Image (cartoon, coloured by chain):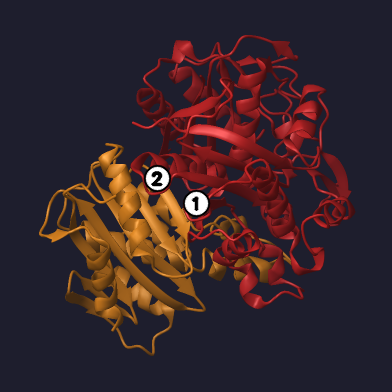
Amino acid sequence: MKKIYLLEDAIISPLGFSTEENIAAVKNERSGLKFHKNNRFPSEGFYAGIIENELLTEAFLKIGEPKKFTKLEQMMLLAVSQVLDKNPDINFSKTALIISTTKGNIDLLTKSSFPENRVYLSELGNVIKDFFGFQLEPIVISNACISGGLALAVAKRFIAAGKFDQAIVVGGDLVSEFVLSGFHSFQAMSTEPCRPFSKNRKGISLGEAAAAILLSSKKPKDPNSISLIGEASANDANHISGPSRTGEGLYKSIQNALREARISANEIDYLSAHGTATAYNDEMEAVAFNRSGLENVPMNSFKAYYGHTLGASALLESILTKHSLLNNELYTSLNFDEIGVSKPLNVIGGFENKKLRFAVKTASGFGGCNLALVLKKE
Amino acid sequence: MSKGNYKITDFVHIKDHRIFHGKEQVFKTEKSLGLDQFLKASYKNLEIAYPKFHKMDGLCKLGIIASEVLFKDHFISPDTALVFSNSASSLETDKKHQQAMGGMVSPAVFVYTLPNIVLGEISIKHKLLGENVFFVENRFNPELLRDYAEVLLEAKKTPAVVCGWIDLKNAEYDVFLCLISKEGEIPLSKENLKQLYLFENE
């Protein structure tokens, strides 16, 4: 089987418009979550990680005309352009474009000066394709909150099978009234910045971000590189919005991903969890991690830095996991106080330097979907 | 990248208030019926007896009906992968949620504003714990479906794949699902998928 490498990447978020700025912010325990006023909420607002429009427009002006593109498109185009800048010789006839999003330009359902078809996810794909001149048809994946990680798995599978040589995977989602009102109706929104796996967690915080990465079967020149050596998804077959009590689908994803990677749970040095900070999700993850023998592995959730960025989250967090491995750094699971799940977990309480080789990244979402990725430092 | 000796074991179509199992029409109603009435009549006719059905949105109801017909004559392994695609994502329910946003929003509607929920509903009904993916494409893309089904089967990630197209937009729908495995007569190919998809669309 061909080895698939995770190469250049980019993160556009409230914590910065490059991977470097984002890593620096996470290292310094800076959060992008802020209070935003909104009458829908009894608390007169909500905490979320939202990108400031002026800053985005200013950054986007360097590559295009902001008026021609929606906010989400600008974020995703910026992310892809950074990856392409580092790969000027890329062959567009052999490079796939894989896009992950849950709701895309859903905010265009209301007032908008953009054509009506722009709300279609395939149109989002075409906008990105045409902007850069990709020649292959974009592949759009919309699979709830595992979309970003599933897009990496799909890219790896196709590259390994020889469908194309390499792929740029880009994920993005917005904090829209659409999703805010929905999560609010579920009573899932936290009245303070979210606290994954904590006893005092009160629900999720939402966030917006775009992230992009180049995947290739070509060995990079840099000997310090990260490969994706195992991946799997599985359905809980339990409930469309409630996490499984046994963590079945997540457990199965982790088992299948480890089996493909040909390593055992005790070789894993770091675990990047989904950790949305809802009562049931975090409990489900704790059960699945314990069943998998991962309870002693240092782990964190990045949700208290970014909020839940939906279709971008598993991609964004995989990129952070990649840099965690490269830098031999374990990042704090921000806002964690006291363990709030029924099973033991080794939540990272503070920044730590540690020699790292293997990591597992997981995600779970509505529809009962689950995903696990295994990353290796070569 | 085609290599495996895989077959299109069986297939189902739902369009214009007609249901085809393979090439045989198994149910139809008057075209003048509304979508909800057609879905209800199909549910009764197929004797599905699954009360959860009535809570689902249109896309999920279409998925449940299609999988009921497709799985009828086969043993479906719990590891079977679901590889679905469409063009409108969950837009029909998205609009319903959008309209409610001025007043009371319902979590029972919001949960259906993701296209992959239909994969979850089918997984729950048939106890499938396999691989899932939902692709959004501007039109039926037999090459993507064939390639991805083959990749999953070749990598031994699944013993069988249910793949196809399930689109719903402005009460217009188009469903074509097939079961891919080692069993059957029709070789899995881009051409065969396209031909079978078009058969009812002519």
Q: Is residue A118 above or below residue A276?
A: below
Q: Quadrant of the N terminus of chain A?
A: top left
Q: Is residue A350 above or below residue A148?
A: above
Q: Position of residue A299 (x, y in %)?
A: 61, 19
Q: Position of residue B47 (x, y in %)?
A: 25, 65
Q: Which chain is orange?
A: B
Residue at 39%, 57% (x, y): give it. B84
Q: Position of residue A242 (x, y in %)?
A: 52, 42
Between A112 and A358, the residue placed more toward the observer is A358
**Amino acid type, callout 2:** Phe
Q: Using residue A233 as the reference point, say whether residue A111 is left or right of it.
A: right
Work out how far the residue at label 1 is from the one at label 2, CA to CA, in angstroms: 10 Å
> Do labels 1 and 2 touch, CB within 8 Å?
yes
What is the crowding at mark 2: few (fewer than 14 residues within 10 Å), some, or many (at least 20)?
Answer: many
Identify residue for label 1: A96
Residue B125: tell me if it is visible.
no
Residue at 56%, 47% (x, y): give it. A90
Identify residue for label 2: A158
**Labels 1 and 2: the sequence-earlier one:** 1
* Chain A drawn colour: red
Q: Does dot 2 land on a helix, a strand or a loop?
A: helix
Q: Chain of mark 2?
A: A
Q: Chain of mark 1?
A: A
Residue A17: tell me if it is visible.
yes
Q: Using residue A109 as the reference point, say whether residue A193 is left or right of it.
A: right
